[in-house]
Image (cartoon, helix red, strand yellow):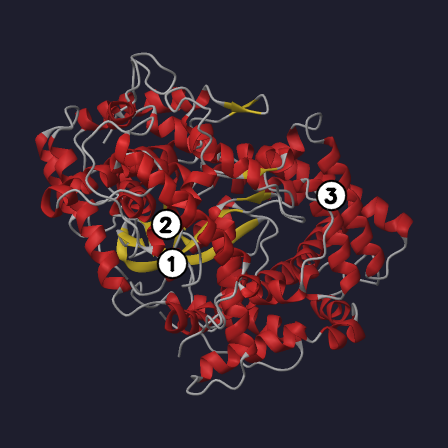
Amino acid sequence: MQVTLLHGRGPTCWPDRTQRERKLLFLLCVVSVGLFISLITTGVFYKQTHPGLCLTEPCITVASAVIEALDRSIDPCHDFYNFACGGWVKNNPLPEGKSRWGPFSNLWEHNMLVMKHLLENTTMKGLSKAEEKAQQYYQACMNEAKIEELGPKPLQELISQIGGWALTESWDKDNFQEVLRSVSANYRTSPFFTVFVSTDSKNSNSNIIQVDQSSLGLPSRDYYLNKTANEKYLTAYLSFLVELGVLLGGSEETSQTLMEEIVDFETALANITVPQEERRDEELIYHKMEAKDLTTLVPAVDWMPYLTEVFAPVPLNESEPVVVYAKEYLQKVSDLITKTNKSLLNNYMIMKVVRKMVSILDQRFQDAEQRFLEVMYGTKKSCTPRWKLCVSDTDSALGFALGAMFVKATFAEDSKAIAEDMVAEIKWAFEESLKYVSWMDSETKKAAKEKVGVYFFPQEVLLFVVSELYFQNVMQYYNFSARVTADQLRKIPNRNQWSMTPPTVNAYYNPTKNEMVLPAGILQAPFYSRSWPKALNFGGIGVVMGHELTHAFDDQGREYDKDGNLRPWWKNSSVEAFKKQTQCMVEQYGNYSINKEPLNGRHTLGENIADNGGLKAAYKAYVNWIKKNGEEATLPALGMTNHQLFFVGFAQVWCSVRTPESSHEGVITDPHSPSRFRVIGTISNSHEFSKHFGCKANAPMNPKHKCELW
């Protein structure tokens, strides 16, 4: 099965050509002139013997894209991000309705169009039952007439089934425990804490129940605790909650009063929530106990009935092992529950369910959410097509069925082999670098090398009943996924079970499996193309691979051994040396700021380590590839060596534009540094970058003191 999104060539006359074709022909003319000139003189940055030019159509096209993204007026040694991305930023204003935009976003839009085509093409032959269900799920989501006809009724009926809501109807004042069990077990809602099944960090061959602090209504505790800086967000949030209450049948006055109480309660939760930067040492926050111990730790909850319902039909007893990751938080949340009146607790639990269901109700609910998000992320008002919401939701609910369709339609048979070959190159480069790490003892180095050697490429398709009613489909999905989660408790962890669906434009490292996962969605331009120079592929997907590999040795990943077990496998001397080396990065990135808001170097440490290690490993792998295969042809009209192109390709993956509100949210919630600092923070630590761009000593991108780890 192959999806073709572009039509055949047809007539060759100029008016019938697409804008892209006319642009390419014009570029060919420009390049022809440029080639003649380049035979006579070298470019501004070109310093080496000309190895030949790549004049294939893909090379000319990508050369055009690279040139358009550059700002040649900027000295690369002064500000490499603006040099590499200045043109891109100028030519790419934020699309309406978007709070951020970059190559990741652009590729995801492309992937969504492919998925839309697949989901709407009901005449395709040879679909599996799972793939047919994905199409049916999507079609139910697209049935707006039925959704509008039902209005809030499905959610109102659900609330009544749970036990009622003080805002709109009578409710049982003594049913706190029952409501808590119901919203957690049936609707995947975590009002006060989150309970789930996952691999035991200290025994990667078994799954275990885990308990942690829950998320809040706003993206971070900071929004509640720093009211001066976040007043407009809190105001918009309160207005949104009030509007939801009114849409569900409450009076405006009552809704205003109850929602103010909810925001105050969430502020109290924010006060006891542990900041993410204080949770990075997993050895310290891991607490293993038996289920009966939870009753002593959190007496406000009837734990055995709760766990029994959440993980039904799996039989449990009081000796069931449990891992707690937020011990102090849970003690405090128990006290908070005990001293809070039952009416407010009921309102809060029901509102958590309501928030989860907003996107599957009629347009009035979605409009209310859109108004809130416009303030939250600074987006311009726009009308997001219904199909985008439905594609995303289908990907969430039946992502591996949809992913199978996506892979068959877009992924060449040998792409996985090519990706594995590149991963092997990156692994070799990282292992080579380990030899020269002076701060690590030899015994720990040997164990680290063994951990690198274990990497491998890792899908279960979940099936549940799909009807023509979208709301019911989502409820079925919640219920079914809860049963699947419970079923995992008595099974060995499945190494083929991914946390991302195939169309996802991202990648991740799983420490308990010691695996890197690269979904098919990211193995395409602008990260990778088999027709591009290797410099761009190593600078694009190669750095992504190196980044994920390095996560095995960041401040959290390093705590897991080659088998994925959390244990102290480093010598103490190497642990102390590691902490000393990484403090350099904490301070380096902590000195950066965006819109006068400083970055949190501790919170972003793991990702910064991965960025730096990933770039170094990918570049070393590229140099090794050249040694084995010879220097490759350069792109036309750029006037750059391939070594320079490697760094430019790396930087241009991170070209982006973002609203101030979105930047603010990123600074306080995202473990990654903002795009600009992912580029300049990394290359300013690279000796190879400064060498190939001829940066003078102490230039902004070539500081005397560099942070080096791997």
Closer to viewer: mark 1 or mark 3: 3
Q: Amino acid at mark 3?
A: Tyr
Q: Which mark is residue 92?
A: none
Secondary element under disc 2, as helix, strand or loop, is: helix
Which of the marked residues, 1 or 2, is nearer the chain's N terminus?
Answer: 2
Q: Position of residue 99 (x, y in %)?
A: 62, 43
Q: Position of residue 223 (x, y in %)?
A: 65, 34
Vertical placement of residue 517 versus 261, above or below: below
Residues marked 2 and 3 touching at CB (< 8 Å): no
- According to the picture, the residue beneath numbered tag 2 turns out to be 60
Q: Amino acid at mark 2?
A: Ile
Q: Looking at the image, can residue 696 be seen?
A: yes
- According to the picture, the residue beneath numbered tag 1 turns out to be 319
Residue 641 is left or right of residue 629, and the answer is right
Which quadrant does the C terminus fall into?
top left
**Residue situated in front as seen by the camera: 330 or 504:** 504
How far apart marks 2 and 3 lie (CA) works out to: 49 Å
Q: Amino acid at mark 1?
A: Ser
Q: Position of residue 46 (x, y in %)?
A: 28, 29
Secondary element under disc 1, as helix, strand or loop, is: loop
Vertical placement of residue 301 versus 284, above or below: below
How far apart marks 1 and 3 lie (CA) works out to: 42 Å
**Residue situated in front as seen by the camera: 254 or 36:** 36
Secondary element under disc 3, as helix, strand or loop, is: helix
How crowded pointer 1 is (Cα within 10 Å; few <14, some 14-19, many 20+) is rated as few
Q: Position of residue 301 (x, y in %)?
A: 57, 52
Which of the marked residues, 1 or 3, is nearer the chain's N terminus?
Answer: 3
How crowded pointer 2 is (Cα within 10 Å; few <14, some 14-19, many 20+) is rated as many
